[in-house]
Amino acid sequence: MTENRDSMACDPHKSDRIILTDLLDRKIGTATKEEAHRKGLLHRAFSVLLFRETESGREYLLSRRAAGKYHSAGLWANSCCSHPRDGETLPEAAYARVTEELGCAAENLREIGRFVYRAVFSDAISEYECDHVFTGRFAGCLHPDPSEVSETRWVNAEELNGLLIEKTELFAPWAFTVLSMALEAEKTGK
């Protein structure tokens, strides 16, 4: 998918103050979401992967990013991704954004790890994030915000593994790490 360079200017959350960090995830300041992404500043983020139990086993909720997103538009990722705002804890932000972006609730979110990644999407936009990964149980019904999510899909671990290996071009850059961390956490019971 091509990047929409102008969509950052139209992002309703571009003025949110997000948390700048060092490589150890210690707060070193704040910046607007737009400034952090245009200047490639390391900042705190989170990724949530929701699951549900079915008769055939556990399924994971994938989200396809809306066409108007300022990067990775139209690509698949974990259930929800965002940034805690200054003064907001990671769990508070994760629960809130699941509701805002997916129109459902999350239960028992737990952090399974974090990683730092950097990806350049265009001359004007990059991601440099200390990404905290959460998993938790899906609750309620899906009512995704169309400005955030264009499509959702439930997959089991085997399907997810196959997609990540065979259809790499369909996924956002951070999704490989987030989703493999979640699969590993399930496998090891962590």
Image (cartoon, grey):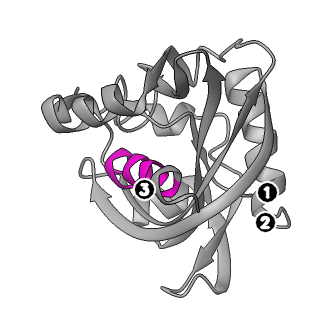
Question: Would you name the residue on which mark 2 appears?
Answer: 86
Question: Would you name the residue on which mark 1 appears?
Answer: 91
Disc on res. 184: 3
User: Element type at marker 2?
Assistant: loop
Image position of 87 with respect to 133: above or below: below
Q: Position of residue 176 (x, y in %)?
A: 32, 48
Q: Which residues are magenta?
A: 174-185
Horizontal arrangement in the rendering, residue 24 relative to residue 158 (left or right): right
Contact check, label 1 and label 3, Cβ < 8 Å: no
Mark 2 vs mark 1: which is more N-terminal? Answer: 2
Query: Nearer the observer, disc 2 or disc 1?
Result: 1
Look at label 3 and name its amino acid. Glu
* Residue at the image position 17 percent from the left and 38 percent from the top: 165
Q: Position of residue 2 (x, y in %)?
A: 22, 28
Q: Dividing the picture into quarters, in which one does residue 64 lie? A: top left
What secondary structure predominates along the stretch shown in magenta?
Answer: helix
Distance (Cα) linking label 2 and label 1? 13 Å
Look at label 1 and name its amino acid. Pro
Q: Residue furthest left?
A: 166
Q: Quadrant of the N terminus?
A: top left
Image position of 88 with respect to 8: above or below: below
* Residue at the image position 59 percent from the left and 81 percent from the top: 25
How many residues crowd around disc 3 within 10 Å: few (fewer than 14), some, or many (20 or more)? few
Mark 2 vs mark 3: which is more N-terminal? Answer: 2
User: Element type at marker 1?
Assistant: helix
